Image: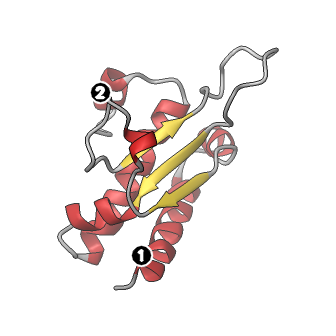
Amino acid sequence: MTPTQRAQLADETVAATLRRLPPAVRDIAARVPVVHHDWPSEEILGDEFEPDILGMFVGPPFDAPTGETPEIAPHILLFLENIWDYAEGDPRTFREEVRLTYLHELGHYLGWDEDEVAARGLE
């Protein structure tokens, strides 16, 4: 599977996952863009993250106080080559991991910390 095919499969998976969300959550989730990268850059990783990270939420959560313009708009990053490696080249596993990673990062957009995300089975 080529990187372009993986990106298309990831887009389809995120869209299908979004459609299955409850309407109230779907409306909120539709506000946050999903961006693909092959791998995380050194700038993204910094000292905090491992190079094999699968996804990341960046920016303020949807319910952050308004008034100040955030430095960066909220968005979800999916690192498709890392997810593909994690899936060991299996398209079905890749789709499932894209779905879980998207939901995990969406949880952060909703304002959930790691414990709340884990409590919902999205780790």
Residue that mark 1 sits on: 6
Query: Of tags 1 and 2, which is closer to the observer?
Result: 1
Task: Using residue 31 as the reference point, say whether residue 88 is left or right of it.
Answer: left
Which of the 4 quarters of the picture holds residue 45? top left
| Residue sitting nearer the eye, 13 or 65 | 65
Residue reaching furthest right? 67
Quadrant including the C terminus: top left
Task: Using residue 35 as the reference point, say whether residue 115 is left or right of it.
Answer: left
- Identified at 64% across, 50% down, the residue is 33
Q: Amino acid at mark 2?
A: Ala
**Dot 1 or dot 2, earlier in sequence:** 1
Crowding at dot 1, Cα within 10 Å, few <14 / some 14-19 / many 20+, comes out as some
Question: What is the number of the mark on residue 41?
Answer: none
Residue reaching furthest front? 42
- Identified at 78% across, 23% down, the residue is 69
> Which element is circle 2 on?
helix
Residue that mark 2 sits on: 119
Q: Is residue 114 above or below residue 99?
A: above
Q: Position of residue 83 (x, y in %)?
A: 30, 61
Could you tell me how far apart the alpha carbons at marks 1 and 2 are, in whole angstroms? 29 Å
Task: Using residue 81 as the reference point, say whether residue 76 is left or right of it.
Answer: right
Q: Position of residue 107 (x, y in %)?
A: 46, 34
Crowding at dot 2, Cα within 10 Å, few <14 / some 14-19 / many 20+, comes out as few
> Which element is circle 1 on?
helix
Q: Amino acid at mark 1?
A: Arg
Q: Position of residue 74 (x, y in %)?
A: 63, 37
